[in-house]
Image: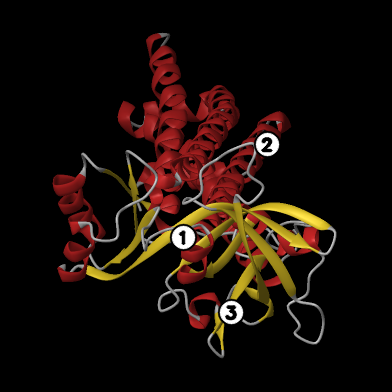
Amino acid sequence: MNVSSFIAKRYLFSKKSRNIINIISFISFFGLLISSAALVIILSGFNGIQSFVEEMYGTYSADIFITPKKGKSIEANHAIFQDLEENKDVLQFSKIIEETALIKKEDLWVTSKIKGVDTSIYSPSFFSKSIIEGEGMLYKTYEPMVLLGHELQYQLQVSSDPNYSNNIKVYGLSRKKKLSIQSDNLFNHDNISVSGIFTMNPELDKNTIFAPYDFVNSLFGYDNEATSIEVNSSNIKKLKELLVNNYSDEFKIETNEEKNTMIYATNETEKWMVLFVLIFILMLSTFNTMASITMLIIDKKKDINSLISIGSKYSTIRNIFFKEGLLICLSGSFVGLTIGVIICLLQNHFHFIEMKNAAINYWPVLIKLSDIIVILLILLIIGISASFIPSQILMKRLLKNK
């Protein structure tokens, strides 16, 4: 251990001649502790919410969505289906028909989106984690069935239990019939049973019904066409580039993240805005450190004169106070980081902070190593700056006056 480090440590723990210096040093230490702990907790909180949202909108979503730019549907014999069938990067794809339907249950009427899907992909195993009542089946003994979002179920007051009345009537505007104010037979309708109730994300829960593709195809008068295609891929980037090169004139091709850009971008923007605010507060906290070092230098004038008398170099004396400030900053920062990580781990395990009437019962937190590294770098830079400025400037002035 060199001389400057030894003296800096002695100054850190020794009693000063003026009690105010001890108070300011403690305030500086405590301010850095709170700021660094807040950085970890708040960033981990944002990470937790972001992870939850990504899971909510990504788990039940395809990797790539293909929708027509012109018109409403994709013809059944379009070349894109053959290309997807032959492409090795395609794990599976589904023709989708998404339309607006009228749903009737006794005297209750609700407007809803109905999504006709390929039952080989949208199987009971696909829906297993999202089903909160009934079963995730779209066929039962060759009879088509539907799945309702739980908010839609509440509006219709329908059960998925076959022991009760679980039938609804679905009305769809036929594409094969001409619109006319004189016509009273524009809608096709069919009775169908509810097999289960799901909860996936607020958008789907509120107004979406999943039904077999064939049922929706028949109800709305489609000729095995699709309003969109959903694709799962082993190489999303490569497949998207290929599809864009071949079909960008005809189709809009988006990944799940691109389709939900606002959701992902908003979370990320909010996170970094809060980070900048906390960094600003942290910088304000370091002014206490600068004040503490300044007062310590003034308080230790006699010691400085003694060191000069025995031949100590300017750099050695400067480093004493620089290291003193660095010890205050780093000790406060590391203790704060440790406390912040412990609080996050406790929240993950015990769920102290609850979220009532929300999609999740508690506030999720996710500690990322990259965030910890960024915080450490920020704390180190601010700590070095706060310690260097008073030790450099004030020491020069003191030596000039000698």
Which of labels 3 and 1 is toward the front?
3
Residue at (80, 78) in percent of width and height: 165
In the picture shown, does residue 271 fall above or below 214? Answer: above
**Mark 1 residue element:** helix
Residue ID at (56%, 43%): 12
CA–CA distance in space, label 1 to label 2: 45 Å
Residue to which mark 2 is pinned: 27
Q: Is residue 298 left or right of residue 91?
A: right
Q: Quadrant of the C terminus?
A: top left
Which of the numbered marks, if any, corresponds to residue 58?
1
- Return the residue at label 3: 136
Mark 3 to mark 1 CA distance (whole Å)? 19 Å
Discs 1/2, front? 1
| Amino acid type assigned to the residue bearing label 3 in the image | Gly
Q: Residue at x 60, y 66 (%)?
A: 345
Q: Is residue 166 above or below residue 301?
A: below
Q: Nearer the viewer, mark 3 or mark 2?
A: 3
Per the image, label 2 sits on a secondary structure element best described as helix
Residue most extreme to the bottom: 141
Q: Earlier in the sequence, mark 3 or mark 2?
A: 2
Q: Secondary structure at mark 3?
A: loop
Residue 291 coordinates in the image, percent (x, y): 58, 24
